Image (tube, helix red, strand yellow):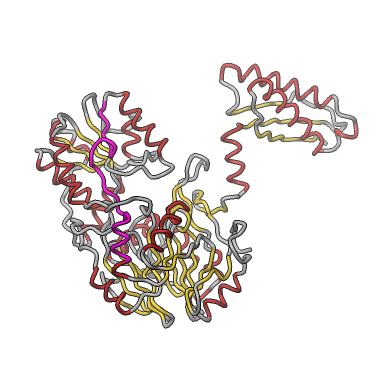
Amino acid sequence: MIGNGRKNAGDGPELAPGAVIDAARNGLVYLPLGGAGEIGMNFYLYGCEGKWIAVEMGVTFADQTLPGIDLIVPDPSFAESLGDDLLAIVITHGHEDHLGAVPYLGLRFPRAPIYATPFAAGLIANKLMDAELEDALDLITKPLGARFAIGPFDIEYVTVTHSIPEPNALLIRTRFGTVLHTGDFKIDPNPLIGKPTDEAKISAAGDAGILAIVCDSTNATIEGKTGSEAEVRESLTELIGRCKQRVAVACFASNLARITSLHHAAEANGRRVALVGRSLWRYTEVARACGYGVPQFLAEHDAARLSPERQLLICTGSQGEQGSALSRIAARDHAVRLEPGDTVIFSSKEIPGNEKPIAAVQNLLLAQGVEILTDHDHFVHVSGHPAREDLARMYGLARPKIAVPMHGEMRHLSAHMDFARSQGAEPVLVTDGAALRLAPGPSRIVAHVGFGRLVVDGLRLLPLASPVISARRRLTYNGLAIVTVVLDRKGRLAAPPVVSIEGVLDQEHDAATEETLADDVVAALRSLPRRASDDDTMVQDAVKRAIRQRTMAEAGKKPIVQVHLVRLD
């Protein structure tokens, strides 16, 4: 098995990387290693005539079950095994789940240049500079709508609309047929920043014949049409006009259209806008460098000089992220202070899994007398992904023979399968690690390869199942006891044991319990047979049992126990 991959029973052929490589040598293969069966961590491979490209190299975000970890990236082991046959990495747009892993994984593919349009390329360049990798990787910027060859692949960027500047679909032409890889998209006739979806180009490709569409599934369960950003601007302008004091708005830093809408809404209501959060400044600076008309904003300390009714603060932290601007403001750990009667608008959607941290931030704000408004109360957000009418429009333009849902959990992929069938396409369910031969012949899963996740732990990448992560999780949930035992040459205690315990008992009882634990260790060692006292493992096991029996009786916990055993000569 390559990497720390996994395979579900009934998924098809066994793990067989060689079969995948053979299929790509004689045909066209699609192989997701992240992003198919989940939302986030997008990493898709296409193989043709023995050569490969990767589309996206994204991250996903850790939750509280991974202490000390913020980011997770796809395990690239199979892609690495391709060596020089992996020709390039092509990025569709600038969201973290599509390009955030480049600083962590890019060095594993030193001969594969990274292609991106200007806005995404600017974001990648900033990341590489922060990581001191700007000279280590070959970043190639392509203009919007560019068409270029990479080995047997003829790649063309197709402008679509989403919730970030310069989202692109990809037309991937090969001698076996054309694939439309949609990236993240919706059909928005008035996106405010950038151009509408290039329907003419997609339709022309459909006329020429599209073998397969690999398509965004995020909103495949939702009827109707995804709304327009222009409609949100009107709603926010009206809503902010009703607010009496200071207004703070939490939104995604990458949503430049929303940020400019908030600036418009503020000006219409006599307010000035400040950005609060580093990523907001980073995205707006890159957008200006790319020629987008992003307005100028105040710094938070300049906004503080204005009366509250003239302030509008755009903040990071719409998902309750620890350390974000809004989380720190809610915890009263930020220079910005909100007061009773102020309003916080969450101009975003709750990403599944973030409900608890978002609720925690909202509860802190409500306790301070701050009014909270969300998309449950008002029209303050519109998705960047296609609902079923948008999907129908895309299928009508592309007219693919085969439909491959991606970018979604299993419920989204399943709904998309049924929908694609209703549009006249042959749907194929493909999840991470499954290699789909698109051509020649009927499409089918030919094999599975190993896939998995790596966690970003400081300066290193570790497998999700790393003993380091397992130990940290056990420490977090169970606490730690450290015991120092000194024995003489005859295996007798040469000094009283020293016990230190953390994360198990409250401070009031720690000292007394540590003395009791030391007594328990003495009793356990004195009860050992003479031969056992000469065996380090048996001594350590006896100490661990004594500690855990006491802490279980006192607190119902079995901490990790580390025994430092010293023997005197």
Residue 131 seen anywhere in this rendered image of the structure: no
Callout count = 0
Image quarter of the C terminus: top right
Relative image position of residue 397 (x, y in whole percent): 29, 69
Relative image position of residue 295 (x, y in whole percent): 15, 51
State yes or no: residue 390 in magenta. yes
Residue 38 relative to residue 315: left or right: right
Relative image position of residue 84 (x, y in whole percent): 50, 76
Q: Residue at x 60, y 31 (%)?
A: 479
Residue 474 relative to residue 100: left or right: right
- Residue furthest to the bottom in view is 175
Relative image position of residue 77 (x, y in whole percent): 55, 64
State yes or no: residue 112 in magenta. no
Q: Residue at x 37, y 57 (%)?
A: 127
Residue 296 seen anywhere in this rendered image of the structure: yes
Magenta residue span: 370-395
Name the foreground residue: 174 vs 537: 174
Name the foreground residue: 403 vs 184: 403
Image quarter of the N terminus: bottom right
Q: Is residue 208 placed above or below 189 in the rendered structure?
A: below
Q: Quadrant of residue 274?
A: top left
Name the foreground residue: 51 vs 380: 380
Q: Is residue 108 placed above or below 457 in the rendered structure?
A: below
